[in-house]
Amino acid sequence: MRVHITGEGVQIDQTLHQFAERRLALALGRFGSRVRRVSVRFWRGEGPTRAAARCRLGIALASPPPLVVEREGSCVHVALEGAAERAERAVERRLAARQALAGRP
């Protein structure tokens, strides 16, 4: 699984990069080669939640279409935690649905 990280108004340092890779490996690693690539985008919220950090994950699976999940948190780490949890559930549901369809007569 390849991980690509970008940010707008958020500094992407080595610590954040390593944290993101570890957290995504923990959440999505069990799916193996079925998860090809994860794009991570961080940015600051707009309006009254400007102080909040947002994280969007684009997950490219072995077969299209890709999944996109997004979470907001008090900091980039919290936003990533929430997005990773949501991504894990979304990938699990998608793969289970595909398996169910493949097993139909």
Image (tube, helix red, strand yellow):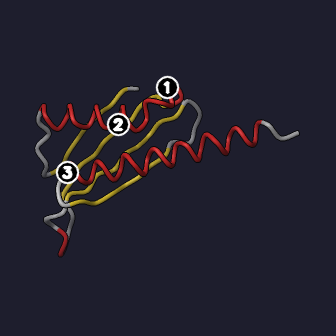
Is residue 23 found left or right of 11 in the rendered image? right
Task: Say what amino acid the circle numbered 3 marks.
Answer: Val
Q: Residue at x 33, y 31 (%)?
A: 3
The residue carrying pointer 2 sits among few (fewer than 14), some (14 to 19) or many (20 or more) residues within 10 Å by Cα, namely: many
Give the alpha-carbon distance from disc 1 to disc 3, as whole Å: 25 Å
Q: Which residue is mark 3?
A: 76
Q: Looking at the figure, which quarter contains the N terminus?
A: top left
Q: Residue at x 21, y 48 (%)?
A: 77
Task: Say what amino acid the circle numbered 2 marks.
Answer: Leu
Image coords of residue 83 (percent x, y) = 35, 50
Q: What is the count of numbered marks?
A: 3
Q: 28 above or below 71?
A: above
Q: Which residue is mark 1?
A: 32
Pick out the residue farthest to the right: 105
SS for tag 3? helix
Task: Say what amino acid the circle numbered 1 marks.
Answer: Gly
Q: Quadrant of residue 23?
A: top left
Q: Residue at x 16, y 67 (%)?
A: 50
